[in-house]
Amino acid sequence: MAPRGSTCLLPRLDTLGKIQDFTICLTRHANKRTGPQAWLEASTKGAILIITSTEIEYHAKMKLGASPTVCGALGGIGGGVAQAYLTMGMTTCMKTVEVTRTKLSVNGAKVPGTFEIFFKIIREQGIRGVNKGVNAVALRQITGWSSRIGIARFAEERIRWMSGKEEERLGFGEKILASTIGGALSC
């Protein structure tokens, strides 16, 4: 049973229809709490990371002749930077605007909309105004992804060496194992 005052009753999960009701209810509640900027960030940052890191890994291998570990670390660095500045900066700014706007509305004054405030920031301060404070986010993304991907590539090399698959592709389970090691040992 949902708490009193809730706008949505959380049904039991005993039939397919109930599961769909539950999913719709959770989506409604998540959207009220996070807003459109969270959905935008969630839907784009993974794609940006994968595209950027894969491209950098490819060029590091082909043009620099770097080892898979170094290629993975370089891909993580580039992917983390792209992720932070292309997606997370804008969405963090929008979330800050939304929180500030909500606090201003308590006083009873007419408060401009989220996008109105966001576009005002762009007009007055440019992209730097939108990306204030993103350097810290970028540093976090760089260290996390470079270590995670680099360690995973190192683990793949060791798995290849131990299984005698020097030039062959790793199996699904072996890739999962390498990724798990990278995720567990990264910073």
Image (cartoon, grey):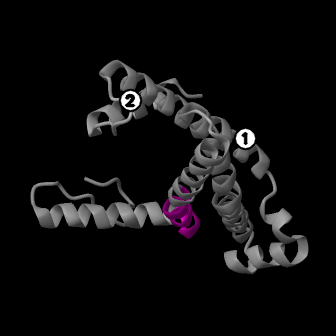
| Residue for badge 1 | 139
Q: Quarter of the image holding residue 168? A: top left
Residue at far top of view: 162
Element type at marker 2?
loop
Q: Quarter of the image holding residue 71? A: top right
Q: Is residue 102 above or below residue 152?
A: below
Residue 46 has which mark? none
Q: Is residue 35 magenta?
A: yes
Element type at marker 1?
helix
Q: Position of residue 125 (x, y in %)?
A: 89, 70
Q: Residue at left 29%, top 62%?
A: 23
Q: Position of residue 64 (x, y in %)?
A: 67, 42
Q: Position of residue 75 (x, y in %)?
A: 61, 45
| Residue for badge 2 | 166
Q: Residue at left 54%, top 67%?
A: 40
Is 174 on the left or on the right of 138, as rendered? left
* Whole-number angstrom distance, CA of label 1 to CA of label 2: 34 Å
Q: Residue at left 59%, top 43%?
A: 61
Q: Position of residue 72 (x, y in %)?
A: 57, 38
Question: Toward the viewer: 92 or 186?
Answer: 186
Question: Toward the viewer: 174 or 119?
Answer: 174
Crowding at dot 2, Cα within 10 Å, few <14 / some 14-19 / many 20+, comes out as few
Q: Which residues are magenta?
A: 34-45
Q: Amino acid at mark 2?
A: Glu
Is 164 on the left or on the right of 112, as rendered? left
Residue at far left of view: 15
Crowding at dot 1, Cα within 10 Å, few <14 / some 14-19 / many 20+, comes out as some
